[in-house]
Amino acid sequence: MQAEPKTSLVGEEYEVEIGPVAHGGHCIARTSEGQVLFVRHALPGERVVARVTEGEEGARFLRADAVRVLEASKDRVEPPCPFAGPGRCGGCDWQHAKPGAQRRLKGEVIAEQLQRLAGLTPEEAGWDGTVMPAEGDKVPAGQVPQWRTRVQYAVDASGHAGLRRHRSHEVEPIDRCLIASEGVSELGVEQRDWSGMESVEAIAATGSQDRQVILTPKPGARLPIVELDRPVSVMRVGEKDGGVHRVHGRPFVRERADGRTYRVGSGGFWQVHTKAADTLVTAVMQGLLPRKGEMALDLYCGAGLFAGALADRLGEQGAVLGIESGKRAVEDARHNLADFPRVRIEQGKVESVLPRTGIIEVDLVVLDPPRAGAGRKTVEHLSSLGARRIAYVACDPAALARDLAYFREGGYRVRTLRAFDLFPMTHHVECVAILEPAAKGL
């Protein structure tokens, strides 16, 4: 017998008391029947009317938006962005919260993930519980810092650029993005007709005047002639191979961080906040305290940001091995670090390349893994190398907490943890954990 189809609850409304914040940009509530709701556009302690956006009878949880606020939190503000709110742009999660409240909420998420997944209290993690704003991001409530140097726009059926709605392929047309950096905004992507394009990515490098637009055309579409108010390189994503190819201008942008210039190829990874690269390099170097002549690993090294910072501080007798899976990123890293003869960059997945290097001991390790984290296998290998300090840079507190638990099994403890709000208005947060052998903490 076929099971009876479950009844969708989308559109149903519940009056609920909002509970604690949860990882992912929403808060937890329960219906009078005990059904769990993950509610966006709400704040802890509020009473709201929540409208279900996803879920069905008998589901473990439902997703919902707060469509009416009956009792508001003192941390609530009118969203500065006219495109924020239920059913609209999904790029920001906390436009309705004061800047200080956003950081407190992110701190609560970090603390909850550390406790639940790693069994660590903030004190055991060497963390004071605060999330620090980036330099220049201390703006009054109701204002938005312009921090995002890379914005991926979707294009609707009319050729208008916009941003995706939350958990949807639908496009919210916009005339500006408030969190976009000044360099991105001045490209005027939102004012152009992009008919025939699937998406448009705008990049404004930090520390240089480099600007780039990457176009992803629909199958068979012709590329538009891009004439903007300032010099800009134009790239396209290939229909068949998915690669990024030059149309005109440089196939890269030049980013500045830690006193060096880094070439970053089209589509390559670079921190999107204008101050992020310098903020993270400072935190990592302050935590590691590199010494002349030491050997270091930089895993998931991208264009070589941390490898360059390490090499500069380790001196002529020091050595750095970087590992990165992206072919173009490896080419960039080798170019960027060519003036350091004792820096080597290997291409491949960390879990595959690291065992093949034959390295059995190192002094320092930096790892900046993707959102999923490094994983047990890689952490076990790193724990066997005897590094005196390890710097773990994490964009996801859940992945960080899981990997910290693996490091503890491998004999490492967290010496310090610092958290930075490098993604204001969103639920994302960046952490830098410094680890050392547990015996040193006794």
Image (cartoon, rainbow, N blue to C red):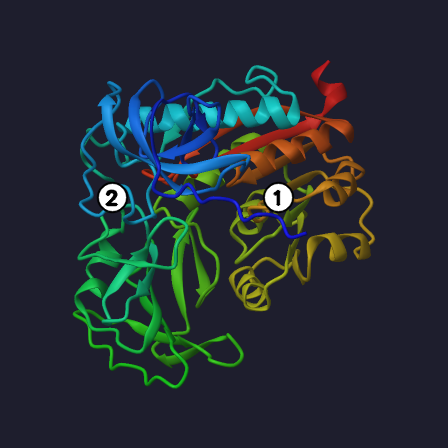
Disc with the residue nearer the chain's start (1 vs 2): 2
The mark closer to the camera, 1 or 2, is: 2
Place of residue 428 in the rendered image (x, y in percent of width and height, measured from the top left): 43, 39
Number of marks in the rendered image: 2
- Residue 140 vertical position relative to residue 83 in the rendered view, above or below: above
The disc placed on residue 84 is: 2
Q: Residue at x 71, y 38 (%)?
A: 363
Q: Quadrant of the C terminus?
A: top right
Disc 2 element: loop
- Residue 124 vertical position relative to residue 157 in the rendered view, above or below: above
Q: Residues within 10 Å of mark 2 (few under 14, many from 20)?
A: many
Residue 159 figure quarter: bottom left
Q: Which residue is mark 1?
A: 373
Q: Kindly report the distance in space between the C-alpha atoms of the residues bearing marks 1 and 2.
A: 30 Å
Left or right, 94 with reference to 289: left
Q: Residue at x 38, y 33 (%)?
A: 39
Place of residue 348 in the rendered image (x, y in percent of width and height, measured from the top left): 68, 62
**In this orientation, does residue 187 appear?**
no
Left or right, 359 with reference to 4: right
Q: Tell me whether circle 1 and circle 2 mark residues in contact (CB < 8 Å).
A: no
Place of residue 125 in the rendered image (x, y in percent of width and height, measured from the top left): 59, 21
- Residue 54 vertical position relative to residue 389 in the rendered view, above or below: below
Q: Nearer the viewer, residue 26 or 375?
A: 26
Q: Residue at x 60, y 21 (%)?
A: 115
Left or right, 415 with reference to 440: left
**In this orientation, does residue 261 appear?**
yes
- Mark 2: amino acid: Ala
